[in-house]
């Protein structure tokens, strides 16, 4: 996560990476670039608090690492963390609304109708939000393209830009590298050093 100033929108902008989230009461922009990952822009409409996460894997509810891992790379953990931080800032669960983006099939070898990571991410987030009673008021998911997402929580506005094929290949390469790093991380987590 890093911060810079967005001159055109005249606001600070926090850029989140896969496995990160950010919640704010301030007049800031939260931004990310998505491929098969999902970002949920969540807001307490009444108390004007909002946030965004960026997760890569829905996680398997039968696996211990989904609940045991303190990583927002899993959808379950990413959603619990962002909702918890919203409440800590004074938000109320009953006022939450969501906007959902991502789940693009940017790795063209993947069949979009198969049980793939993008499809699983989309299914997970729809089920999770439905189970929590949080309405999805906007969404742009699926397809074969990546997305650049900029969220202004105070205004409740989201700007989404579909990425051109050249940018998609960069997102796909980044996702392959991220997947490799995750596999390495999981193997390292299995080790116990003493």
Image (cartoon, rainbow, N blue to C red):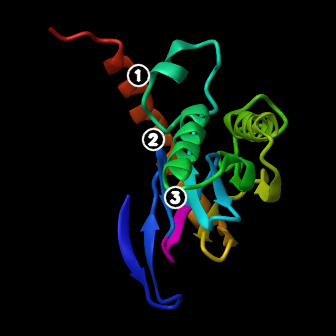
**Vertical side of 52 occupied by 65: above or below:** above
Residue to which mark 3 is pinned: 170
Q: 3 left or right of 97?
A: left
In reply to whether residue 25 is colored magenta, the answer given is no
- Say what secondary structure mark 2 lies in: helix
Determine which residue is flagged by label 2.
178
Of tags 2 and 3, the one toward the viewer is 2
Q: Report the residue at 74% width, 35% height from top.
A: 128
Q: Residues within 10 Å of mark 3 (few under 14, many from 20)?
A: some
Q: Which of marks 2 and 3 is nearer the N terminus?
A: 3
Q: Which of 8 and 132 is in front in this view?
A: 132
Q: Which of marks 2 and 1 is in front?
A: 1
- Local packing at callout 1 (Cα closer than 10 Å; few below 14, some 14-19, many 20+) is few
> Nearer the N terminus, badge 2 or badge 1?
2
State the separation of the CA atoms marked 1 and 3. Answer: 24 Å
Q: Which residue is drawn at 73% across and 55% down?
A: 95
Image quarter hosting the N terminus: bottom left
Image position of 186 (left or right of 33): left
**Magenta segment range?**
26-32
Crowding at dot 2, Cα within 10 Å, few <14 / some 14-19 / many 20+, comes out as some
Image position, residue 40 (x, y; %):
65, 52
Q: Disc 2 and disc 3: Cα gap in Å?
A: 12 Å
Q: Earlier in the sequence, mark 1 or mark 3?
A: 3
For disc 1, the marked residue is: 186
């Amino acid at each position: 996560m890093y911060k810079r100033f967005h001159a055109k929108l005249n606001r600070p902008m926090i850029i989140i990476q896969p496995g990160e989230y950010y919640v704010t009461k301030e007049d800031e922009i939260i931004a990310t670039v998505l491929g098969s990952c999902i970002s949920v822009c969540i807001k307490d409409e009444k108390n004007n608090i909002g946030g965004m996460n960026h997760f890569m894997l829905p996680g398997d509810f039968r696996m211990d690492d989904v609940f045991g891992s303190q990583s927002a790379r899993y959808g379950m953990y990413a959603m619990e963390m962002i909702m918890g931080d919203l409440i800590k800032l004074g938000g109320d669960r009953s006022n939450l609304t969501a906007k959902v983006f991502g789940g693009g099939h940017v790795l063209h070898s993947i069949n979009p109708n198969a049980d793939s990571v993008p499809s699983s991410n989309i299914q997970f987030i729809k089920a999770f939000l439905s189970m929590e009673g949080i309405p999805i008021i906007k969404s742009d998911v699926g397809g074969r393209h990546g997305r650049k997402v900029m969220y202004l929580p105070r205004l409740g506005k989201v700007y989404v830009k579909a990425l051109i094929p050249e940018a998609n290949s960069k997102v796909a390469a980044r996702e392959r590298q991220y997947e490799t790093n995750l596999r390495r991380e999981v193997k390292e987590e299995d080790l116990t050093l003493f």
